[in-house]
Image (tube, rainbow, N blue to C red):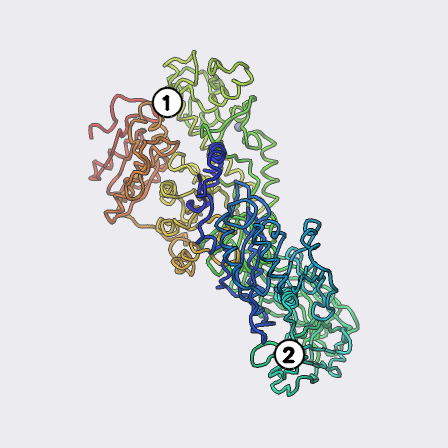
Amino acid sequence: MLRQNRHPGKRIMRVRTRLLAVVAITLALAATDASAEPSLESIEQSNSLENNHQTPHTKWGKPLASGKIRTLFLVNQNPNINGLPLRHVLELMQRFDISGDAVLAMTGKGKTYAITYQGGAGVYGGETGAKRLSGLLKKPYDCYVVTGPVLGHLPATSRTTILKHVQQGAGLVLLYTTGDKDKPLLDQFQPCGAPTDSLEGIKVRCFQSGRGRVVSVQGYSSDATWNAYGPTNTQRVFGFHIRRDLFYEAQGRAVLWATNREPPLKFQIDLGSQSIPREQLASRKIKLSWNDSTKNIPRRIAMRIRSESRGSQQPRVIDDPGAAQGQREFQLPTLPAGTYWVDVIAEDKNGVTGWAIKRFDVTTGTRIAKVTLERSSGEAGDPITGTVEIVGPGIDGAILRVHVIDRHGRVLARQEFPKPGNRVAFSLASDTRMPGYLGIEAVIVQDGHDACYGYHGDAFTITRRKQDQWNFMVWGRLYATQFLELADDMLAANGVTTRMETSNVPWWYMTRAGMNYTPYCGSGLYRLPDMGPQEPTVSEHGVLERAEGCWNHEPEVSARLKKWTEDERDFRHRGVLAYSMGDEVAVLGSCLHPACWKVYQEWLKAQYGSIKALNQSWGTSFSGFAKIQPIVDETSIPWYPKRSQRIPWQLTWANNAHSSRGPTSGSTAWKDTWRNYPRYIDRKSFQYWNFANYCRRFRDAARQMDPHARCGVEGSDIFLDADIDVIVRNTGWWMPYAGENGGTTNEVIRSIAPGDYLHGNFMGETTFWSSILRGGNTLGKWRVDNMFTPAMQLKPAMKRMVKSGRIIFDGLGTLLNGNPKSEMLDEGIVMLHSMASVKMAKIGDGTSYGIFRWRDDQGKTRSGTPQSQFHVVNQRNHRAWHRNIRASGMQFRYTTDGQIKRGEFDPTRARVLVLSQYEVIGPEEEALIRKFVASGGTLIADVRPGIYGDRGRPRDGGVLDDL
Ligand SMILES: [Zn+2]
């Protein structure tokens, strides 16, 4: 069985899909295998109500004079994603005197692919979870709060116990819109009228069940709601704090009513009218009256006026209310126009005895109708220009000010206009010290007071790409709309600097939290098949499969690249670290489309210069490059009866030049003279080049739209088995996997990439420090909702990583690795990498060398049987060198055959060259190695150095044998 928690993360997706067929069979055989269920410890962790991350809130009823309300929360959890369902509970508990426990439950079964919480419908954690619930139900709870239609999915005995407790007097609060499915539940209760005072503004259905009260909350007042996808102008800058306060305040009242614990003290707040002209404020008073039905005298009453933007006032406190029933008046302050909430909270010595909230509006005849910007983004230093429109009668002596403000309302730049007309053009300076997310505020000042405000309908962003910093990238979308702004702030506070896959999520909250983006783009790349050959496959027409078609077929390709990159135009302004061409995609590709084959012929010509040189290399006698055609062996797989079945395979093998390597399956035509390693290696080289060239073309298209565009891929799983050199030279960003055995690619990348190349380990959690110590400037983590507990706390592994990596997040990461000018030092030990050597080690008799058993970092054998998987052959040899060099307290770097051929490798900086399974040595490499040794350099080689010449051409003996 697969166990989710054993695997560090995203990698499992690939493993899972590859093994899907196997899993399906295993599941059928092992349906009762309890190991799939999470442990009690992990269930407790998922249900934990510990709150280490307080968010802004008002303690409406905390502590309560009447004491704590012991509550069991039965919380609806989506099995496939983490929608942070327990955060609602914490938000309620921050504001009310509620203690208790939570039980996550699900109404459906998760999908195998993206499952976050295993198990079928019912209590999360299967039998263990159900047992935990029945244990919890032995405690006396005052209230049961249910956040979704999960009651019907609990074990019947637990459900019966809960309903029995309710009949005996406990409260039951249903915090979801009940429907037909809830009819059998609600039919057990006697409907009763809703109280008009204590549940005012909440749409409810109230019931009685024995001695217990049941309330089903169907809706909230508009003041207590917010739309993360459509915030108001002021909410975009200042956030939703008041709306959240009012939302959970309403839920708190429902809990208090259900538990028969309504606050004894009632308030009346009288402002005369809900809408007050600003010039009348001086003559208006807030009349506050209270009455405690228990004749209890409040010790303290606090009154506040709050606004979502400007105008909030310091609280005013009545220290001597003096009587259980009383009245006070407050003069209304000089407020700017806007919407306000006045709230009052009364306390006795034990806690809160009552509170009330009332909304009012302040209006002005003259107001800001609109703030328009010429552009809503720019580089630091660009002016922020626009227009303010004012309507209403002019005011003598009024001044217009236009501000650049941050999310806390602090003024960062200001322009002042005495005697403004109806339309005022402004231009404000921006600079590098400003945050990336700015509000543009206009204010009319009258008699020294701010009279009214207006805001631009969107934020102005200073584009922050952070391409010269250390970045912590988190993959995935957050499925908790109501908490986007809180979660993004929390992620940013814990080191996250960039987010991936942002297509369906508003950017405001991420930008406001200081993060940038790595958008997923349409790209036409493809994933390798989950099972079978790890090579491109083609259709019966010879065209690349699983992609959007051939990468070289014009003009379609150019048109698609233009469209895909144009789709990301909006993100460009918010600061794009890199444009992702895909996750877990293949880094090679070619097909037999005529356009593609023509590009191959041209590529061969560029490589060889003349057909003579190619013929010499291949041992052929073509009269021109146009004569070179794919070798399609139509005799292979004869057991497939239909030609249409054979063709796609025969073409796929032709596309991958298999007949140049050895016979294809079932071939009767193949002869040993067909074996042509240079031809095979050239085809492979082309396939990597073709991928890299396609990435370069994508980048060029992206740069039409964003001149700063860096492009590349992440999550590739290639170890050393690719032309890393050609890929690095044609991309700007690459983050391969890097688990226990996957770090080899990253070792080559960090050695050969330019200083500003974005690279590092994807899946950096267990590999956090190894990525940093290997020079990675970008760390990837899968996936955002998996980093949080359901209560929006950092999961333990994430917490440990943040704790250990704080110094990296706080600046060392940028200083060491993010800085393009920083260079990793080494002892002059240089390892060589070439794609040709890796490929040749896997064909012919090469596979009998270097196939060690799978070993971990301690050298322990993990499997009793030798494995020769797609990629592991070569990288394991290299890993042994890495471990030994580092164990000797030394550092190394890589160079590649490409660097040597281009003269980019400086042998005078090297003291030792290490050839690990370096089977292919071409003339340039040979010359360099000989010169290096002759000048006193040390050469160390393991098995079979240089037994092949350029492009895998067989030799008699190793080329360096005489050294
Ligand atoms: Zn093609």
Q: Nearer the viewer, residue 791 or 416?
A: 791
Q: Is residue 546 visible?
A: yes
The Cα atoms of the two marked residues, 1 and 2, are separated by 85 Å
Which of 947/193 is in front? Answer: 193
Q: Is residue 322 above or below residue 864?
A: below
Mark 2 is surrounded, within 10 Å at the Cα level, by few (under 14), some (14 to 19) or many (20 or more) other residues, namely: many
Residue 664 appears in which quarter of the rendering? Answer: top left
The spot of residue 59 in percent (x, y) is 58, 71
Q: Is residue 742 left or right of residue 61?
A: left
607 up-or-down from 285: above or below: above
Type of amino acid at the residue the image marks with label 2: Met
Please determine whether, in this image, residue 19 is positioned above or below residue 252.
Answer: above
The residue at 38%/58% (across/down) is 804
| Numbered disc 2: secondary structure | strand
Q: Secondary structure at mark 1?
A: helix
Where does residue 247 sit, x and y in percent of width and height?
64, 64
Query: Closer to the N terminus: mark 1 or mark 2?
Result: 2
In the rendered image, the quadrant that contains the N terminus is: top left
Label drawn at residue 598 = none
Q: Is mark 2 within 8 Å of ligand 1?
A: no
Q: Nearer the viewer, residue 180 or 581?
A: 180
In the image, which is nearer the foreground, mark 1 or mark 2?
2
Q: Which mark is residue 303?
A: 2
Q: Is residue 558 above or below residue 820?
A: above
Where in the figure is residue 808, as x and y percent of width and height? 40, 58
Neighbor class of circle 1 (other Cα within 10 Å; few <14, some 14-19, many 20+) is many
Locate the C terminus and report the quarter of the image it occupies: top left
* Residue wearing tag 1: 677
Residue 575 lies, in percent from the top left, at: 54, 53
Residue 595, by quadrant, is top right
**Amino acid at the residue labelled 1:** Tyr
